[in-house]
Image (spheres, rainbow, N blue to C red):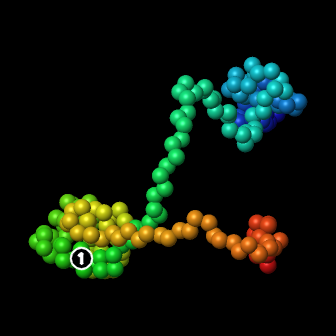
């Protein structure tokens, strides 16, 4: 007579040594190994599922002990954008020449790589605002301009204007996929 065919746990897939255990999970009777029996055997039948449900466990929320602070009306700041000056390369290059230091020394002191410093000084790429601030601070030069934005409070609508259906509805046109 041949060897008995090995049986596998219907939960984890491990080969079952010995007789195995029968568990009732969500109405189905399954054959499980000793480890899975220890893990799931003590639970009430039909009350749990070994399959993930896709829901995350609910996070505990604790009551707030401090009262929320009333928000202060903020003073409106003028809107502006920060732009890098057009002749940034020339300014950086001259500053490097004035310092009399090598790109290697400067890269360590400023906190930019040698390649970045060289690329900016030779105009191969524009510095980011963060990089420009570092260069401004180190060399004492100006690389960032503030450009004020003119924003009207509300668009003026003529008195004799009658709204159209498109004005009333928020229209979103999606292109059809072909």
Residue drawn where x is 62% and y is 29% of the image: 61
Q: Nearer the viewer, residue 153 or 41?
A: 153
In the rendered view, does 74 fall on the left or right side of 124?
right
- The residue lying furthest to the front in this view is 159
Which x, y percent locates residue 155?
63, 70
Residue drawn where x is 11% and y is 71% of the image: 100
The answer, for residue 141, to whether it is visible in the render is yes
Q: Nearer the viewer, residue 89 or 2?
A: 89
Residue drawn where x is 79% and y is 66% of the image: 169
Q: Secondary structure at mark 1?
A: helix
Q: Nearer the viewer, residue 170 or 63?
A: 170
User: In what quadrant of the picture does the N terminus appear?
Assistant: top right
Residue on which the image places disc 1: 91
Which x, y percent locates residue 55?
72, 40
- The residue lying furthest to the right in this view is 27
Which x, y percent locates residue 120?
30, 75
Q: Quadrant of residue 60?
A: top right
Which x, y percent locates residue 46?
84, 27
In the rendered view, does 105 fall on the left or right side of 8?
left
Q: Quadrant of residue 135?
A: bottom left
Q: Is residue 23 above or below residue 165?
A: above
The answer, for residue 173, to whether it is visible in the render is no
Q: Is residue 58 above or below residue 142?
A: above
Total count of labels: 1
Tell me if mark 1 has few (under 14), some (14-19) or many (20+) residues whose alpha carbon lies within 10 angstroms of its own: some
User: In what quadrant of the picture does the C terminus appear?
Assistant: bottom right
- The residue lying furthest to the left in this view is 100
């Amino acid at each position: 007579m041949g060897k008995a065919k090995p049986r596998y746990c219907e939960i984890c897939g491990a080969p079952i040594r010995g007789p195995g255990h029968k568990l009732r999970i969500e109405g189905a009777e399954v054959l499980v190994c000793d480890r899975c029996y220890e893990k799931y055997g003590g639970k009430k039948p039909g009350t749990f599922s070994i399959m993930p449900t896709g829901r995350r466990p609910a996070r505990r929320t604790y009551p707030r002990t401090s009262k929320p602070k009333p928000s202060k009306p903020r003073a409106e700041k003028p809107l502006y954008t920060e732009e890098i000056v057009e002749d940034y390369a020339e300014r950086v290059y001259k500053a490097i020449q004035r310092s009399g230091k090598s790109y290697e020394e400067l890269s360590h002191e400023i906190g930019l790589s040698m390649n970045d410093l060289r690329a900016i000084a030779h105009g191969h790429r524009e510095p980011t605002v963060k990089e420009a601030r570092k260069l401004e601070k180190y060399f004492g030069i100006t690389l960032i301009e503030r450009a004020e934005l003119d924003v009207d409070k509300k668009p003026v609508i003529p008195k004799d204007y009658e709204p159209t259906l498109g004005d009333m509805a928020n229209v979103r046109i999606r292109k059809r996929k072909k």
